[in-house]
Image (cartoon, helix red, strand yellow):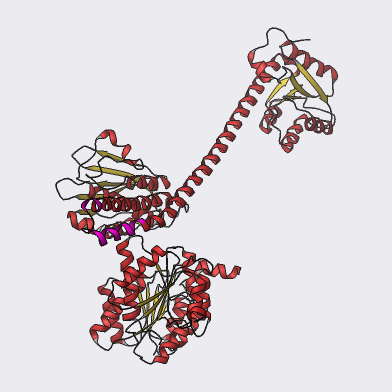
Amino acid sequence: MTGTATRTASEADSSASDGKLQVLLVEDNPADAELVLRELRREGFDVTSDTVQTIEDFTRQIRTRSYQIILADYNLPQWRGVEALEVLRKEGLDIPLILVSGAVGDVIAVECIKQGATDYVLKDSLARLAISVRRALQEKAQRDQRQQAEQDLARKAAELTRSNQDLEQFAYVASHDLQEPLRMIAAYTQLLSERYRGKLDAQADKYIAYAVEGALRMQTLIRDMLAFSRVGRNGVGSDPSDCNHVVEEALLNLKASINESAAVVVYKDLPVVAAERIQMVQLFQNLIGNAIKFRGKQAPVIRISAQRQGLHWQFTVADNGIGIAPEYKDLIFVIFQRLHARDEYAGNGVGLAICKKIVEHYGGKVWIESELGHGCTFYFTLPAHQADEKVSHVPHQT
Amino acid sequence: MSPTKPEILLVDDSPADLDLTLEALASSTYQSRVNTVPDGEEAIAYLHRAGAYSNAARPNLVILDLNLPRKDGRVVLADFKSDPALRSVPVVIFTTSHSRQDIARCYAIGANCYVSKPGNLKDFRTAVQAIEQYWFSVASLPD
Amino acid sequence: MNEIEVDILLVEDNQDDMDLALHALRREKLANKIFVVRDGEEALDFLFCRGAFSQRSFDHPPKIVLLDLKLPKVDGIEVLRQVKSDPRTRTVPVVIMTSSKEERDVVNGYDLGANSYIQKPVDFNQFRDTVKLAGLYWLVTNQAPSTNGVLHKQEQKA
């Protein structure tokens, strides 16, 4: 019998591309087999089928042909139809199997489903068969879709990782190799300036000064780019860092600008975090340096603190500087993005981008709250170090 | 034991770096006599007083770049340090490489010290002058 | 002594010289990571990570060893010989710092692989300046090999 006009769209989707539903019947009674097929056709399925009775034939069939559904009797002369599930597992095939059988009791029925049968239909209630088959096919289609999506995701993630690595490698090599010729330019323009200042004309002095300025700026830029590309190059280090020592080191590095600006940095009882020390120093140094640089008329006062939040510490670095307008809150973390003219504030806009990269490298977040004219508060999260947390630092002022 | 007119052998293939180093040495108070060679083979010939260098003075200090054409700096270093007549001459590796492997390998071959060429002019001069000051005023050199 | 990083290993048995050296280095803020041993045997134990120093690792050698020649138990030359002939310790910079003026000691020192030789000035102030300049040179100007592990593995491959 051919399909009727009652075939639904879902049936069409579930069946083979040529519209046929390929069924493997496991049944030793030809009359029962015929009844099942007739029922399917009556419900609109365009069925092609094979029938097997032994486990060997079953195994051979599923290896050589593809089926969308298996309908198996529970009781066969030499094996339990449900053993077919084991064969399917061994072959790594995900084909829905519905048991179509005489009464065997609820316990066995439930047991079969537990072992992986999709459903159980009684031979004298074949009216349920079509619904059961449709549902089985639908679920299989969904499973396939999900698996496909997961594979696509995995492949895209791998591509992205590879592309990122290529980019980092490129940035690193470029920055590294550019330093050498740049060193020559910077050194010799400065030598020119020293040797010939006042001996050529004022124009020459000006040109040389521009060249020196450009070379020096480029040196800083490339150094910053190198630092940026280095974050994450060596994997996530798990050596813990005591943030009190980290801040001490950062302050040592910033000694000149701290003295120059009469900056005061307040921090107390900072925790130990699961993050590499060199990166932590860079992170704090950039934030503190930033706070000092963008100071207002008053001497900078910078307060650093931390609050435990589950497995993380949330740090706060608050200053009393010029602040930033709310619309730039995200922009300031973008690499090379600057908010001020070069002659107002020096710098090339990499410092905060490096901070963001470092924090995100450890799975944390960084964000800012600020009002123009009222200072900035940077917040960022870092993973806590599980073992002995030394938080024994006395309030510290420089 | 500290020579009054120290002899320095400077080995560097970059004329720009040679000039920079010479300039830094010239402006110091030590009246060093600096001889330069542009590659490893010449350096070895100089030290062995071979060929054109038969009248070469024995250097009190060798300042050696690593990345040289023909004979690489590491090969030159190995050559000096395995020659009993030359091994006691102090060799300062002065190079742009910051690589940990290069540093470790040079020390293993027998480099006396390793100084990375700084990126900016001021620090470069400071480094060169520190090298001179240490080797000619602080350390004792073999005669 | 565990994995604390030591920048300077001072091998000195004379108390006055030791105090003076430490004082000079402290003024330059170079003394944070300095460790003092009083004889050649202790020096060898330290550098070869054995005995009282068995928790030390060859991967974290000091950046510089300031080695006196006249030492009890094992003398400086023997310490130098052993350190410079073992691939695990050969790359550690060793600076002989001694009162001897003998030319043969100088040549011998360099021949045996000492990275440098410094004669201790008799004058108090000069001694201090010498130690300060030496400390600055070997810790700031110079690049010490940071870990021996790298080289060690390479040598095994070769």
Name the side, left or right, on which A346 lies relative to C110. Answer: left
Q: Is residue A313 above or below residue B34?
A: above
Magenta segment, which residues?
A185-204
In the picture provided, is A21 more to the left or to the right than C132? Answer: right
Relative depth, front residue between C57 and C90? C90
Q: Pick the quarter of the image with the C terminus of chain C.
A: bottom right
Please identify the quarter of the rendering in which residue A335 is found: top left
Q: Nearer the viewer, residue C96 or B46?
A: B46
Q: Is residue A327 magenta?
A: no
Estimate the x, y position of residue A341 in percent, counting from the top left: 25, 41
Q: Quadrant of residue A71?
A: top right
- The answer to whether C32 appears left or right of C91 in the picture is left
Q: Is residue A394 visible?
A: no
Counting from the top left corner in percent of width and height, residue A20 is at 74, 18
Q: Could one spot residue C62 in this view of the protein? A: yes
Counting from the top left corner in percent of width and height, residue A62 is at: 78, 30
